[in-house]
Amino acid sequence: MITTKSLRPSLKTVLKASTVAGLAAVMLTSGLPASISQSFAEAVKVEAPSVPSFANVVDAVSPAVVSVRVQSRANPVSEDGNGFTFDFGGRGLDELPDDHPLKRFFKEFGPRDGDRAERGPGRRGPHGEGRLRPTSQGSGFFISEDGYLVTNNHVVSDGSAFTVILNDGTELDAKLIGKDSRTDLAVLKVDDKRKFTYVAWADDAKVRVGDWVVAVGNPFGLGGTVTSGIISARGRDIGSGPYDDYLQVDAAVNRGNSGGPTFNLSGEVVGINTAIFSPSGGNVGIAFAIPAAVAKDVVADLIKDGSVSRGWLGVQIQPVTKDIAESLGLAEASGALVVEPQAGSPGEKAGIKKGDVVTALNGDTVKDPRDLARKVAAIRPGTTVDLSLWRNGKSESVKLEIGTLPKDDKEAAKSQDNQSEESQPSSEQALADLGVTVVPSDDGKGVTIASVDEDSDASDRGLKAGEKIVSVNNQEVKSADDILKVINAAKKDGRSKALFQIEAENGSRFVALPIDQG
């Protein structure tokens, strides 16, 4: 039984509780006594790792980076509503097809009229020629203390007068030393008594994906602007030419950054900002820079000769796909397949034939057409080289003297989508296993494709009515019987595919078709 007395706290207990409450009040208002505070753990404190700062790099390289302003007396190649000039191998942006990758990459890459500072009315040329007007602006950087600087070809293309603006605001006239549309590089020269701060090229062998980079340039005409990021990828091909070998970076690059440098943390130039991929027209973290290894040699030639002299083989080439490799008996899909040697070219003189696969140059393995184009271009014209070929199921070697690439020549791997509505069937013969119907050609060369089964492998690989089959496995054919004889011979050799040379109005190409059905 609980009594009332038992529920009453003793005076001693009450006094004890009061004392504790009083102590708590003291603790809350005046802090813990020293003896008590020492018994509690310390507040959380995190030692943050040291974060790299780009300030030292920026301080060192900024004086070497300039803005480039271009004026012209002629209409720009293409303005596209923003006053920015481009030159893609002599063609303007407006001349490129809508689905061309460069049109997508470059369409918005240039300052808008509203982004440029007001420059007032145009001035007349140095010799009293027509009135000059602003046509483009971009970025650049000094590579020597006597005033040589690098920028993009598409920044200065068709320009008549050039001005560089230093990071302290000083404006200096510059003259064009040389430009190269194939790599989109140009060199300007400023004649001034001062010694310019300049930067050096980075060692390409030490540039790795994931390395920090700093981009400095003139986006939207704002002047010296610094952004940072990393190298996202190497060896990017954006379809601008046979020498594409771009670095991809995620530093913020925008209109006006063209020709500006991308630095490593040692203040060396790893690349030259040239293009962006941007569905919206602004930075989305995908920019492309010409590697220092490419730019260094081209720039040296431009300074020395005002132009670039490249080696030339003179053959039309295309990639070796897995199917093509199998049809030719190659162990792997690599090398460059010769579609046609050009008349009078070094390749033709050396006996290179259509259907040959270039597998190595001076013992150095050729990975693909782009790799071959770069290797040949880097060789001094007049040099004798050893070329390894795969021909008729075996390896051969030929010696040839590298020629000089003509100015208007484009040596590139081409993927063509040739179409012709013309079809002249007379005595159709079906090649059911291939999905095509062929008839003899009027000129006696090859056979004309009369029709293509939409559900066939031939249709999937792009064959179209009106095109010609001129050879199969590098053997000329003039009838369906000829084709079937070559196919049967290939089957006896254990091959599951045959290599067809297809000719159309815009050129020829090779296609590997399965031959083991049925």
Image (tube, helix red, strand yellow):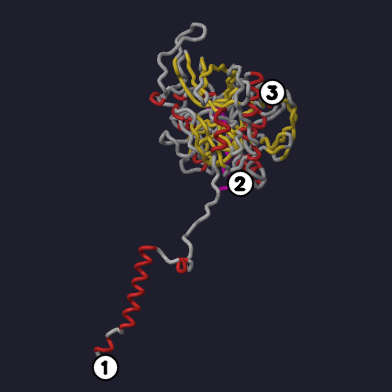
Determine the main secondary structure of the stretch shown in magenta: strand
Q: Position of residue 36 (x, y in %)?
A: 45, 69
**Relative horizontal placement of residue 327, taking residue 398 as reference (left or right):** left
> Which picture quadrant has residue 507?
top right
* Mark 3 residue type: Gly
**Residue 448 in sight from this viewpoint:** no
Q: Identify the residue at image location x=74%, y=32%.
A: 386
In primary-sequence order, the first of circles 1 and 2 is: 1
Residue 25: percent from left, percent from top: 34, 67
Instruction: Point out residue 352 in the picture as x, y percentages from the top left corner.
Output: 69, 29
Question: At 56% from the left edge and 41% from the top edge, which residue is drawn?
Answer: 212
Number of dots carrying numbers: 3
* Camera-nearest residue between 21 and 476: 21
Counting from the top left corner in percent of width and height, residue 454 is at 46, 41
Q: Is residue 9 magenta?
A: no
Tell me if residue 515 is in the magenta stretch: yes
* Dot 2 amino acid type: Ser
How far is the residue under mark 3 from the one under mark 2? 38 Å
* Highlighted magenta segment, given as a residue range: 503-518
Q: Earlier in the sequence, mark 3 or mark 2?
A: 3
- Residue bearing the label numbered 3: 403
CA–CA distance in space, label 1 to label 2: 102 Å
Crowd rating for badge 1 (residues with CA inside 10 Å; few <14, some 14–19, many 20+): few
User: Label 1, on which residue?
Assistant: 1
Mark 3 or 1: in front is 1
